[in-house]
Image (spheres, grey):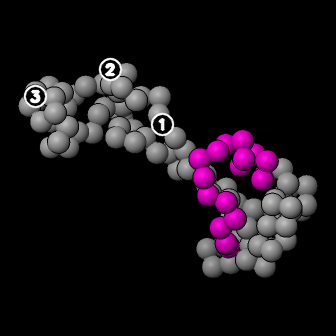
Amino acid sequence: MITFFNKKLLYMGFDAEEVGRIKLALKDSGIKYEITTKRNAGPYSKEGKAVLGAGSFLARGGNPSASSAKVGDMVGYDEVTYLYQVFVEKKNLDNANAVVYP
């Protein structure tokens, strides 16, 4: 069982295809793993509204209604990314590296 105290980071990145490749390699080798995913919405909140700081407010000419702009109206909406982390048991880190990165 992988716990907070016995796990080590094997991979961290934004490439879903690479995570899939790593997952298959670890599964085929019988190495236990854990994958976590974190959504990175950039300057946008998860509710779909823009998160505007003082600089953005001033850049929009001080328009108070700009803070309620919908994400679909803003440039860069399609830049939502996911951060993937693949962990393995500390005792299996060397074996996992050998399997994943031959």
| Magenta stretch contains residue 95 | no
Give the amino acid at mark 2: Asp
**Split into 4 quadrants, where in the image is the C terminus?**
bottom right
Residue 82: give x, y in percent of width and height. Answer: 55, 44
Q: Which label number is shown at residue 61? A: 3
Q: CA distance from mark 1 to mark 2?
A: 15 Å
Residue 64: give x, y in percent of width and height. Answer: 10, 29
Q: CA distance from mark 3 to mark 2?
A: 17 Å
Instruction: State the residue at coordinates (71%, 49%).
Output: 19
**Split into 4 quadrants, where in the image is the N terminus?**
bottom right
Q: Which label number is shown at residue 73? A: 2
Q: Is residue 55 left or right of residue 37?
A: left
Q: Is there CB contact under 8 Å for labels 3 and 2?
A: no
Q: Earlier in the sequence, mark 1 or mark 2?
A: 2
Q: Which label number is shown at residue 8? A: none
Can you say whether 59 is above or below 70 in the image? below
- Circle 1 sits on which residue? 80
Q: Nearer the viewer, mark 3 or mark 1?
A: 3
Q: Is residue 50 left or right of residue 41?
A: left
In the structure shown, which secondary structural element does the residue marked by tag 1 occupy?
Answer: loop
Magenta stretch bounds: 7-23
| Magenta stretch contains residue 8 | yes
Give the amino acid at mark 3: Gly
Q: Is residue 31 left or right of residue 49?
A: right
Task: Count neighbours of disc 3 (C-alpha within 10 A) and say few if under 14, some if 14 to 19, many if 20 or more.
Answer: few
Q: Is residue 45 visible?
A: no
